[in-house]
Amino acid sequence: MNILFLQFLLQVIFLTIVFLHISKKNLDAVWAYGIQSFAVTILLLNSFFETGNVSLLFVALLVCIVKVILAPAFFARLIKKNGLIFSVSTYLNAPTTLIVLAVLFAIAFSGIFAPLTNIIPAHETLLSIALSTMFLSLFLIINRKSALSQIIGILSLENSIVAFAIFAGLEQSFSLQVGILFDISIWLIIATVFASMIYAHFGSLDVTSMKKLKD
């Protein structure tokens, strides 16, 4: 597949994470995550066509079924069931958030991580972008007050790690493939139970409502 198209897919992943930071509606965030996961699916399919590794095809199909179809459907149903139309606010305001995102992006391209992004010299820029998506996903988990947004942030982090591994030439690693499958199964179970229990107990997914919890 053309390297420019692969770069486009990576940029889609990056932009969806930026959108997750500024989105005000939970449903919009869910659709952004679905688009992001679809881009990862295409990257995995490309690796399958290049390597002929059947296990990559299996992983790509599973990612498509679970993360592109089932997970967004589950989150959308959760939003509709509990009336979670609007996303809970962030700890930092929008301008400050965008500044932090720009700083994290610059750090990913700095010489600090050159040994990591130079694993494959031809993919240095792509690896730097993938690294920045990991940083932005981590910040999403930290900055959002909504448990739903934090769950999506964790799943976006996993997508970013997979994208980095693909451009680093690690996608054929059996341990990585097992890790992806484990993540898919475990995190959906955790997301289902965790989000449902929080809303049932607090009537909200705003994690700040848990500040008064006592042992």
Image: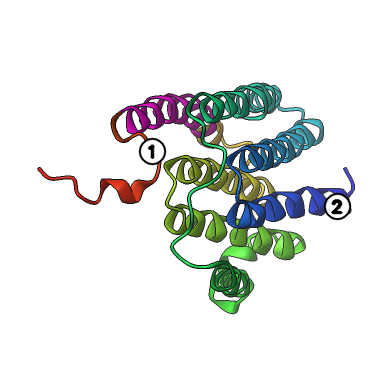
* Residues in magenta, as a range: 178-200
Relative to 6, 95 lies left or right: left
Q: Is residue 185 above or below residue 115?
A: above
Residue topped by disc 2: 3
**Could you tell me the amino acid type at mark 2?**
Ile
Residue located 56% across and 59% down the image: 136
- Near-viewer residue (137 or 174): 137
Of 157 and 179, which appears nearest the observer?
A: 157
Q: Which residue is mark 1?
A: 204
- Look at 65% across and 66% down and name the residue there: 118
Report the coloring of the rendering: rainbow
Name the residue furthest bottom: 111
Q: Are marks 1 and 2 in contact (CB under 8 Å)?
A: no
Q: Main secondary structure of the magenta part?
A: helix
Q: Residue 158 vs residue 44: left or right?
A: left
Counting from the top left corner in percent of width and height, residue 150 is at 46, 46
Give the amino acid type for the residue marked by disc 1 in the picture: Ser
Is 126 placed left or right of 200 in the picture? Answer: right
Marks 1 and 2 sit apart, C-alpha to C-alpha, by 44 Å
Magenta highlight on residue 181: yes
How packed mark 2 is, by other alpha carbons closer than 10 Å (few <14, some 14-19, many 20 or more), is few
Reading the chain from its start, which is encountered first: label 1 or label 2? 2
Q: Nearer the viewer, residue 14 or 149?
A: 149
